């Protein structure tokens, strides 16, 4: 019996970065998977960092953590969400990983004294990593390989050379180059311009790569004559020039690509005899997103609010949860430093819920703590993630437990009351990269908790990325208050979830639930948090109507009687 051959689709980008290669790759992967194929996706990042774990979010955006503890590029989040399958460390390849491996081998003498060069040593290592997922799972039909950066970037040249070689080593129908490029609309001229795409493809062809499909990002529909012009100058049949017009949300992209015939083109060129995809479930999800029955306002209070990509998975999780609750989630971005300077009421008086996301460093922490106090006292739904949970513990310790100097050991080493402390297995750790508590860990839930009701299970598995934890020395102090340790590690040693009992919805988690939310199946905690904000919004609006109906004088009398 002949060994099954895995086919490879290489997605490159031109003109400018951030065109959406990750979403395009994930969308194509979804379409092929819906056709019955076993699909995997790899992101090749040209930076020298081993992974993005130590990179500033302002530079790189969110670090997406996998079940196996790998810290990866945010595009892997798109892969997981669109394909509804978990990635591994083999799905993210960086220049840093490649060079580190090759240099380590050279130091060991593996190359027997040969001169170590980009070709063949670096390119062979890249090809080996691209082939690895198929070796791990021989049933893989197609691997989509996204090459980070743009054509012409000096650091991405080894990756481009490696995939050029792979095309030579395989049958023509077993490899396919797709190039994503920009076709800008010049408003002053009232027309689109094809020259950037022509030059981008020219640069690719100069290094020996001929794209067979062009995906053109554009703000306007491409006329047939424009497609023909692009095809003529780029040596691509016009039927394989795909228009990727801007859409309202990223979950429309697979539907757009299918309408444009991208998956048909891929199947034709790669000789894949597969049925049409069933996109009904996906289509239904998009309809819910675009046609909400109501709206809620959620404030996200953090220090990276000026770079939304730092919270990419959280943003997507709110879209998923909003669709499941039939509401549109309007996100209000609030700088924790502005809360500290101007007070919480100015920014949070009109919201339906507050989320404090994860983060590192002391800057902005006091603003987060103040915002938590405000929503706790005003019975506004609250959701804290990682540092957000830790800030909730600090706030409760200060204002309910009477520990006015409570804080985290992460920020102050000489604290009298470090209610958040360094984990025992993090003592003495000096390397920053890949050394936190990373990846999937299990937790047991209290069956009387809101978290248990959300999950509908006594034991869960969630992804972590942290060094600090709830200090167990303070458990008894919190136990005497309406405060629940709602989730613990299976051995009972680590606090994973906290809840305030006498509050409509106040939940803090040490893990990152946003990393496991999916478009067609929102995360249980995000789903129930949004449900709580919908209920709060409904009660709040009923109260506003009542106040308006009463009139100012009658309302003031009632408020005075209530206080008496």
Image: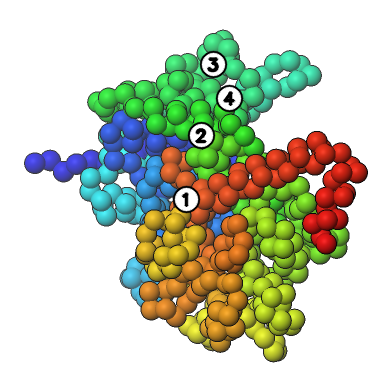
Identify residue for label 3. 227
Please tell me which of labels 1 and 2 falls first in the chain. Answer: 2
Q: Nearer the viewer, mark 1 or mark 2?
A: 1
Crowding at dot 1, Cα within 10 Å, few <14 / some 14-19 / many 20+, comes out as many
Left or right position of 363 against 424 = right
Crowding at dot 3, Cα within 10 Å, few <14 / some 14-19 / many 20+, comes out as many
User: Where residue 389 appears, x then y in whole percent?
Assistant: 60, 67
Q: CA distance from mark 3 to mark 1?
A: 41 Å
Q: CA distance from mark 4 to mark 1?
A: 30 Å
Instruction: Say which mark, if any, is on residue 523.
Output: 1
Please tell me which of labels 2 and 3 falls first in the chain. Answer: 3
Q: CA distance from mark 4 to mark 2?
A: 13 Å
Q: Above or below — where is 1 with respect to 429?
A: above
Of residues 110 and 552, the one drawn nearer to the viewer in this rendering: 552
Instruction: Say which mark, if any, is on residue 245.
Output: 4
Identify residue for label 2. 251
Q: How is the image coloured?
A: rainbow
Please tell me which of labels 3 and 1 falls first in the chain. Answer: 3
Task: Specify the quadrant of the image occupied by residue 396.
Answer: bottom right
User: Where residue 232 appears, x then y in whole percent?
Assistant: 51, 16
Crowding at dot 4, Cα within 10 Å, few <14 / some 14-19 / many 20+, comes out as some
**Secondary structure type for disc 4:** strand
- At x 45%, y 28%, the residue is 283
Crowding at dot 2, Cα within 10 Å, few <14 / some 14-19 / many 20+, comes out as some
Q: Nearer the viewer, mark 2 or mark 3?
A: 2
Please tell me which of labels 4 and 2 falls first in the chain. Answer: 4
User: Where residue 93 appears, x then y in whole percent?
Assistant: 44, 55
């Amino acid at each position: 019996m002949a060994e099954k051959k895995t086919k490879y689709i290489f997605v490159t980008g031109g003109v400018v970065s951030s065109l959406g290669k990750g979403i395009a790759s994930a969308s194509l992967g979804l379409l092929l998977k819906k056709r019955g194929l076993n699909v995997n996706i790899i992101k090749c990042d040209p930076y020298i960092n081993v992974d993005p774990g130590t990179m500033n979010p302002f530079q790189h955006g969110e670090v997406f953590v996998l079940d196996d503890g790998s810290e990866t590029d945010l595009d892997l989040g798109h892969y997981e969400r669109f394909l509804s399958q978990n990635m591994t460390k083999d799905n993210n390849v960086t220049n840093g990983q490649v060079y580190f491996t090759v240099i380590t081998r050279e130091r060991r003498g593996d190359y027997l004294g040969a001169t170590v060069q980009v070709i063949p040593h670096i390119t062979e290592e890249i090809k080996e990593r691209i082939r690895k997922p198929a070796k791990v799972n021989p049933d893989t039909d197609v691997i989509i390989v996204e090459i980070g950066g743009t054509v012409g970037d000096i650091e991405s040249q080894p990756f481009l050379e490696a995939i050029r070689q792979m095309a030579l080593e395989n049958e023509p129908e077993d490899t396919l180059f797709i190039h994503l490029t920009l076709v800008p609309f010049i408003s002053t001229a009232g027309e689109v311009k094809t020259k950037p795409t022509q030059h981008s493809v020219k640069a690719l062809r100069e290094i020996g790569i001929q794209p067979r499909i062009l995906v053109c990002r554009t703000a306007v529909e491409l006329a047939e004559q424009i497609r023909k012009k692009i095809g003529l100058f780029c040596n691509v049949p016009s039927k394989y020039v795909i228009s990727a017009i801007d859409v309202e949300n990223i979950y429309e992209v697979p539907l757009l690509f299918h309408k444009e015939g991208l998956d048909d083109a891929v199947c034709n060129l790669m000789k894949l005899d597969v049925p049409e995809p069933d996109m009904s479930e996906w289509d239904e999800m998009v309809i819910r997103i675009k046609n909400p029955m109501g709206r809620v306002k959620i404030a996200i209070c953090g220090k990276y609010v000026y770079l939304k990509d730092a919270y990419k998975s959280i943003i997507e999780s709110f879209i998923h949860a909003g669709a499941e609750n039939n509401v549109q989630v309007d996100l209000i971005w609030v700088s924790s430093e502005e809360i500290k300077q101007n007070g919480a009421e100015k920014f949070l008086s009109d919201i339906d819920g507050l989320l404090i996301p994860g983060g590192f460093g002391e800057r902005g922490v006091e603003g987060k703590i103040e915002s938590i106090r405000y929503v706790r006292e005003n019975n506004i739904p609250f959701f804290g993630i990682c540092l957000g949970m830790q800030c909730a513990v600090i706030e409760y310790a200060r204002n309910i437990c009477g520990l006015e100097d409570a804080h985290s050991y992460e920020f102050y080493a000489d604290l009298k009351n470090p209610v958040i402390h360094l984990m025992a297995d993090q003592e003495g750790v000096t390397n920053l990269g890949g050394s936190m508590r990373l990846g999937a860990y299990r937790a047991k839930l209290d069956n009387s908790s809101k978290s248990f009701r959300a999950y509908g299970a006594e034991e869960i598995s969630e992804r972590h990325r942290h060094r600090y934890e709830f200090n167990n020395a303070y458990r008894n102090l919190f136990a005497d208050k309406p405060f629940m340790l709602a989730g613990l590690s299976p051995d009972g040693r680590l606090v994973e979830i906290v809840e305030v009992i006498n509050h409509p919805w106040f939940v803090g988690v040490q893990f990152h639930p946003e990393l496991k939310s999916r478009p067609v199946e929102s995360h249980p905690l995000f789903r129930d948090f949004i449900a709580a904000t919908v209920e709060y919004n409904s009660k709040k609006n009923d109260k506003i109507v009542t106040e308006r109906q009463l009139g100012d004088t009658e309302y003031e009398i009632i408020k005075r009687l209530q206080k008496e």
